[in-house]
Image: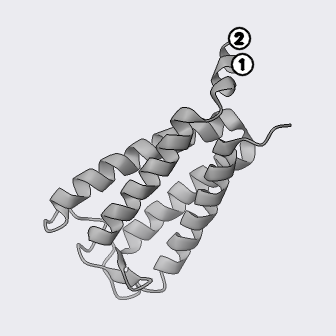
Amino acid sequence: MRTSPNRLIATVFGAVYLLVGLLGFAVTGSVGFIATEGGLLLGIFEVNPLHNIAHLLIGAALLIAGLSNAMAAKATNSTIGAVYLLLGIVGFFIASTSLNILALNTADHFLHLASAIVLLGVGLTADKTVHSKANA
């Protein structure tokens, strides 16, 4: 069986986002659940408990998809990539407002955009035969 780029990326990103979600709780002990300012993860990425939970859910979705099949991984990578693209762009506009319920900062925006590029890039370009076989 051929290794699927979508499964590999989903599995790796899923594991990383789960780890980030768990580590985030180490710096958000005194931060409100939806505080607009949070603790600094790795000294640069601002997070609050809601942001940590979002990372856990996204990590779990990616990991489950990556461990299942190429079609699920492709769909999950594309969907989460699109959401991260939107969040990366919108984040720049809401960072200094009360709408910033994820305690996003500039470093978060660029990380979300980078994640979007990788997830969308792989999700939309790799494993082309997966979709074709599914429709046959």
Q: Is residue 24 above or below residue 82?
A: below
Three-letter code for the amino acid on which mark 2 is drawn: Ala
The picture places residue 8, in percent across and down from the top left corner, at: 69, 50
Whether residue 41 sits left or right of residue 127 in the image: it is left
Q: Where does label 1 land, which residue?
A: 133
Q: Residue at x 58, y 58 (%)?
A: 13
Q: Residue at x 50, y 39 (%)?
A: 78
Colour setting: one colour
Which quadrant is home to the C terminus? Answer: top right
The picture places residue 69, in percent across and down from the top left corner, at: 73, 38
Q: Is residue 16 above or below residue 8?
A: below
Whether residue 98 sits left or right of residue 116 in the image: it is left
Whether residue 123 sits left or right of residue 24 in the image: it is right
State yes or no: discs 2 and 1 in contact (Cβ < 8 Å). Answer: yes
Check disc 1: other Cα within 10 Å, few if <14, some if 14-19, many if 20+: few
Q: Is residue 28 above or below residue 100?
A: below
